[in-house]
Image (spheres, rainbow, N blue to C red):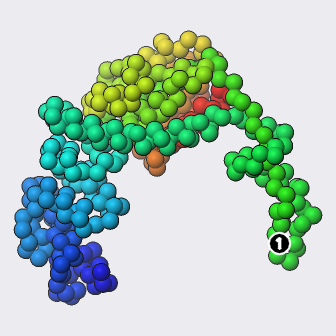
Amino acid sequence: MTGMERWRLILGEPAGPHCGALEGPAAGRDAALEWLYGREADREDRDVRRGGQGGSVLTTVTWLDDVHRLFPKETIERLERDAVERYDITEIVTDPEVLARVEPNAALLRAVLRTKHLMNPEVLAMARRIVEAVVAEMVRKLAKEVRQALSGTRSRRPSTFKQARNFDFRRTIRANLAHYDPVRRRVSIEKPMFSSRTRRHLEQWQLILVVDQSGSMAGSVIHSAVSASCLWGLPGLKTHLIAFDTSVVDLTSDVTDPVELLMKVQLGGGTDIAKAVAYADGLVENPRRAIVVVISDFYEGGDPNRLVRTVRKLVEQGSEVLGLAALDEDANPDYDRDLAQRLADVGAHVGAMTPGRLAEFVAERIG
């Protein structure tokens, strides 16, 4: 593809007189991009769009076929994500013909969770394929992080087992200071030093994940379900998963099957964080060996004063309370900072954290 063709695709049809006409695959790419992003001019036109060169009218199915034929994988995922999340083209996850062609990815998983109530049994069975594929990949990645986080703490004893995560930076610098080059201002590492690890003693701890299932928290619900599944069954760690909107649902019995768990989640509705945290408080068996993780945007629709009182009670009795503003890959927070600050003032840890970092936090506390 030439540079002028790239600029023509970026700028759209108005750049045609200056960049020249598109032919062949480039014209097809332009038609596919116009079908999707041409909606910016009129968001109400959500059915069909004509390509920049006056090509045939595209349906969602043919558009998807063209996208998979004309673009690389990374671009396909971006286009599908924008179709579902930016332009609300739900046919991608509710039309059997489209579902048969679509490539499972995280954006489509979120779309399935938001639209599964619209699906008939046949379509729902096909959509489950997307859930299973994406969850399996997430479990594979996160399970490794969880194992690493919980495999042991560093001790001061040196080790001959050379592994990157056991590298001892301070001892390495001290051991190699004799090889400092003042001209280059560098220390030559001739003898890297490593630390040994002690086994973590996981015993009689509770982890209670309390997850906001309002529509904006879809990513957090997904990662909480996968995290709970990976943490389930670890020696001495009893994991609970609680989902809430204005009601509270205990999903702990489904933690071993994150796919089934996610298919039961009902995204949307209001938010009553106080009620959910009070329920979690009732589950605590040994306050000094309990971690309560509240995953929410903290826009409270219930009683914020009750929420603060319950969190204060949990902290004062010795429990760890962690408030997560987000739990997705980017840990991109969007939350009520005033309420979050009130929770921090009574002893809660509040911030943004990836699933892997959550596992490290749990490991540090129970270690």
Residue 182, relative to residue 77: is it above or below? below
In the image: residue 84, left or right of residue 354: left
Residue 196, relative to residue 248: is it above or below? below
Residue 101, relative to residue 154: is it above or below? below
State whether residue 352 appears in this view: no
In the image: residue 174, left or right of residue 223: right
State whether residue 226 appears in this view: yes
Q: Nearer the viewer, residue 230 or 82?
A: 230
In the image: residue 349, left or right of residue 6: right
- What kind of residue is marked 1? Arg
| Residue 109 on image: x %, y % | 31, 42
Q: Which of 197 and 244 is in front in this view?
A: 197
Q: Which quarter of the picture shows residue 178?
A: bottom right
- The residue at the point 32 percent across, 65 percent down is 72
| Residue 8 on image: x %, y % | 24, 79
Give the quadrant of the N terminus: bottom left
- The residue at the point 25 percent across, 61 percent down is 68
Element type where label 1 sits in the image: loop
- The residue at the point 42 percent across, 43 percent down is 137
| Residue 141 on image: x %, y % | 49, 43
| Residue 318 on image: x %, y % | 63, 19
Q: Which of 207 and 176 is in front in this view?
A: 176
Instruction: Report the number of discs.
Output: 1
In the image: residue 6, left or right of residue 258: left
For mark 1, what is the residue?
A: 185
Give the quadrant of the C terminus: top right
Q: Which quarter of the picture shows residue 151?
A: top right
